[in-house]
Image (cartoon, rainbow, N blue to C red):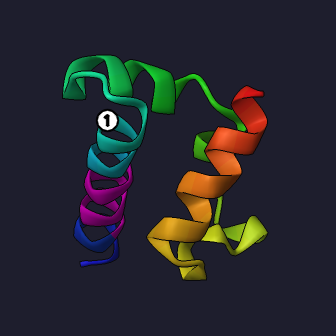
Amino acid sequence: MRDSVLWRKESNIIMMLAEVLHIDAERALNLFYSTKTYRQLSDPQYGLQLMSDKYLVENILAELQ
């Protein structure tokens, strides 16, 4: 169950990235998977799974700058 919740969270983040950056979902997906935030989100020791999707999108945007 935890995997499906994380999968939904990642999907929401990807769609939010696509909307904010005005890019298609596939490009947002590739961008998301290349970030440090994604790697940390995948590792429970960082606790990013508990953060809001909006916070994580803002974190990714800051990382990209």
Q: Is residue 59 left or right of residue 4?
A: right
Q: Quadrant of the C terminus?
A: top right
The residue lying toward the viewer, choosing from 43 and 19, is 19
Q: Quadrant of the N terminus?
A: bottom left
The number of numbered discs placed on residues in the rendered structure image is: 1
**Residue 7 counted in the magenta span:** yes
Foreground pick, 34 / 2: 34
Q: Nearer the viewer, residue 9 or 1?
A: 9
Query: Residue placed at 58% from the left, 43% from the top?
Result: 38
* Position of 59 relative to 46 (above/below): above
Q: In the image, what residue occupies the spot 34% across and 64% down? A: 9
Quarter of image, res 43: bottom right
Residue 33 image point, x, y percent: 49, 28
User: Residue 37: x and y, percent?
Assistant: 67, 46
Q: Is residue 63 magenta?
A: no
| Residue marked by disc 1 | 18
Magenta range is: 6-13
Residue 57 occupies quadrant: bottom right
Residue 43 vertical position relative to residue 46 in the rendered view, above or below: above
Q: Is residue 62 left or right of residue 12?
A: right
